[in-house]
Amino acid sequence: MAQILLHGTLHVTIYEASELHHGNDPGVFRKLMANIEETVGLGKGTPKMYATIDLERARVGRTRIIENEPANPRWYESFHIYCAHLASNVVFTVKDDNPIGATLIGRAYVPVEEIIGGEEIDRWVEICDEDRNPLDSGAKIHVKLEYFEITQERSFNHGIKSGKYPGVPYTFFPQRKGCKVALYQDAHVPDNFIPKIPLAGGQYYQPHRCWEDVFDAITNAKHMIYITGWSVYTEIALVRDSRRPKPGGDVTLGELLKRKAEEGVRVCMLVWDDRTSVGVLKKDGLMATHDEETEQFFRDTEVHCVLCPRNPDDGGSIVQDLQISTMFTHHQKIVVVDSAMPGGGSDKRRIVSFVGGIDLCDGRYDTQFHSLFRTLDTAHHDDFHQPNFPDGAITKGGPREPWHDIHSRLEGPIAWDVLFNFEQRWRKQGGKDVLVSLRELDDIIPPSSVTFPDDPETWHVQLFRSIDGGAAFGFPDTPEDAARAGLVSGKDNIIDRSIQDAYIHAIRRARNFIYIENQYFLGSSFAWEQADDIKIEDVGALHLIPKELSLKIVSKIEADERFTVYVVLPMWPEGIPESGSVQAILDWQRRTMTMMYKDVIAALRAKGSDEDPRNYLTFFCLANREMKKDGEYEPLEQPEPDSDYEKAQQNRRFMIYVHSKMMIVDDEYIIVGSANINQRSMDGARDSEIAMGAYQPHHLVTRNEPARGQIHGFRMALWYEHLGMLDETFGHPESSDCVAKVNRAADKYWDLYSSESLEHDLPGHLLRYPIGISSEGDITELPGFEFFPDTKARVLGTKSDYLPPILTT
């Protein structure tokens, strides 16, 4: 049967199944229970029935488990499914979850051709065996389906349109109005770095300074300081710019938090518990998060610091708990404080929250200069971060690993949503009930707008998460309540995966361009080409973001409209670049890019065009290269001879690590958070994540004018940081002139970065990602660059034969 592209939204309800066995012949169940009892030595087995929904190779839905009803399980669960899949059938699979693994009962098939017309289907469907023959019992499953083509969505290709846009539907948190947002590029911005960037209303863009603002927020808190982090390191200093000193700015983060707690401020911290921080690995663990050091630093103090493993429930075995806790992480990075009202004319206080990608730990402080060697005697002497060489150390000199990241500060009702997220997590894993009851404090203003609707600088903001009931208290118990809250059933828990939904919605609304910065870029494995070296069904990187992006470009090509997607990545994921895990991730990334470019090229060829696909989709990385200057830090030791470390030091170059998790659409909508574009972050049952999506209702794209609010200014500031220049074409990123200028600059900077000699500092940091694209869309090596400069690491990656995909996707 021919496969049909389902690109839109599929509403599915699974009601119940019947006649899975009948009479005195339990058939499959009798054999199943006997097998379980014989295999694991249990007494009488108890069937645990669940059903799944598949679109060919992609699992897109799963019910909860129903016990003790093997013949007629009743689920009555509804699913709101975003789809971008080629499929011939919607497949409903019924399984039993038992001690020896999930056992197939049978599958039911609804042909896609029957639903693409948009008619609702409500019927009992035969359940078949693996040869697609109906089960002898006459088993059936009752389902309802209704499909909505993407072109039927009112917001498709229409952007935000107006301030009445209600936000992403079917989510736990609604969109909040009357908010304020500050956007941060990197941990710090030096004075006078950003040039004049004109905005609407005769204003100019003013940058904000992340770690200075976090320092002020913590310093001025009166009632509470709540922090979550993948890593929180007590020995860092938040204020390091000698031209912008602050009273008390020389204190470490750990001492600052202890001081605030001693003043009576309730300081609560949830830090991911890296379970490898034990035994032979000592305190650092595999991920060097300092979690044990941090917990020990605050032990027997007034600071409540709790290490949280990422396990979904308390019912698993010790081995299962350790596997899950070491495989996945708590990845949210938030700070929540109470803050004085602006202007200082009131004793009232309100909640302020910080959300984004920057952990409060070592290696994160950087400016837009991203120096490799010149700050080793100053800002980075006690914060030298270089995990890409086995022996990286300040005593052996640079290059350090520069860090590029994005963060945000939120005020208004949205800040309380971040607070509620913290409270949910604390009540699940925090232990003691020490949370401040802010609603009982007279000086705390309850959730309310901080801007008026007619204020041109007002924001509408919505909070999104990837998290499950194992990490957050208070998720609904019933499927009906969960569905209303935008939550879905998982294997062990109710799941919130609204970050993926937010990305999908934003991509589908996009009119002109999308600009992405992310630490990883892999997914939509259901659309990858079959290959001899992998079984696609086993990869499991099923989130839709890459496929949604390529389908967006295809739709624009078919409509003869300009559209460009810019994606900025690190050269390689942080770590030893030739290591198995890094190479495996690069391999998944290559397969993702190939899928996307094949889509784009096919659309161009269908139009009779041989245009370069990089005019529509282009990937970049960031790097720096510096001439040596007098007075630089001179190391006491040297790297090993002929090592990659020595080569990078001699060539005075290294990548800038892109740790951002951000997407800008049409300069009118932005997503900032902790979630990477991979399955770990988008799944909901793997890494826990948080993100915000925001827009300014007075600064939207209109029929005649582009958006010129704070998001536009922020993107232009980022492009100035990356390209070392501003150009009038940058105001229209979708235009062929703009993408051509950016690609030319990136090609030039790659040539300068990779050349054997260096005559000047690199004039900009944005480099083309070092890949080629064949006429068929396959990702190839750039001539002469099988390996990244100064490494033995393949640019295209290498499939791992021993690391499971669930770990690297």
Image (tube, rainbow, N blue to C red):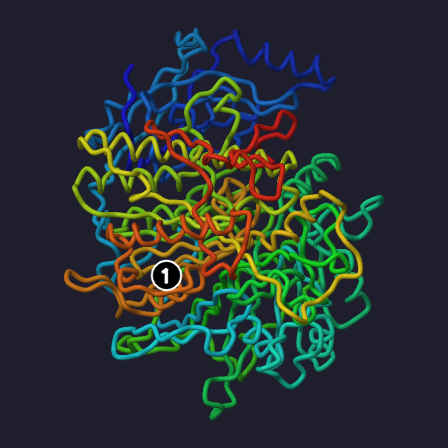
Q: Residue at x 75, y 45 (%)?
A: 641
Instruction: In this rendered view, identify the residue nearer to me: 225 or 391.
Output: 391
Q: What residue is rendered at 28% in x and 41% in y?
A: 553
Q: Position of residue 410 (x, y in %)?
A: 46, 69
Left/right placement of residue 62 relative to residue 803 reads left
Name the foreground residue: 655 vs 273: 655
Front position in the image: 594 or 635: 635
* Residue 55 image point, x, y percent: 38, 27
Q: Quadrant of the C terminus?
A: top right
Q: Quadrant of residue 318?
A: top right
Q: Name the kind of residue labelled 1 in the image.
A: Gln
Choose top left, top right, bottom left or bottom right for residue 800.
Answer: top right
Give the side of residue 583 with respect to residue 737, left or right: right
Task: Reply above or below: 32 against 598.
Answer: above
Report the quarter where the N terminus lies.
top left
Kindly tell me whether residue 75 is visible in this rendering.
no
Expressed as whole percent of the image width and height from the top left, the position of residue 21 reads 48, 13
Q: Secondary structure at mark 1?
A: loop
Residue placed most toward the observer, 310 or 286: 286
Numbered marks: total = 1
The residue at the point 71 percent across, 59 percent down is 397
Determine the image quadrant of residue 628. Answer: bottom right
**Is 83 displayed left or right of 354 in the figure?**
left
10 Å crowding of disc 1: few (<14), some (14-19), many (20+): many
Q: Position of residue 198 (x, y in %)?
A: 30, 74
Q: Is residue 291 visible?
A: yes
Q: Which residue is mark 1?
A: 175
Q: Is residue 63 above or below residue 648?
A: above
Residue located farthest toward the bottom when viewing the structure as drawn: 345
Tell me: residue 557, above or below residue 245.
Answer: above
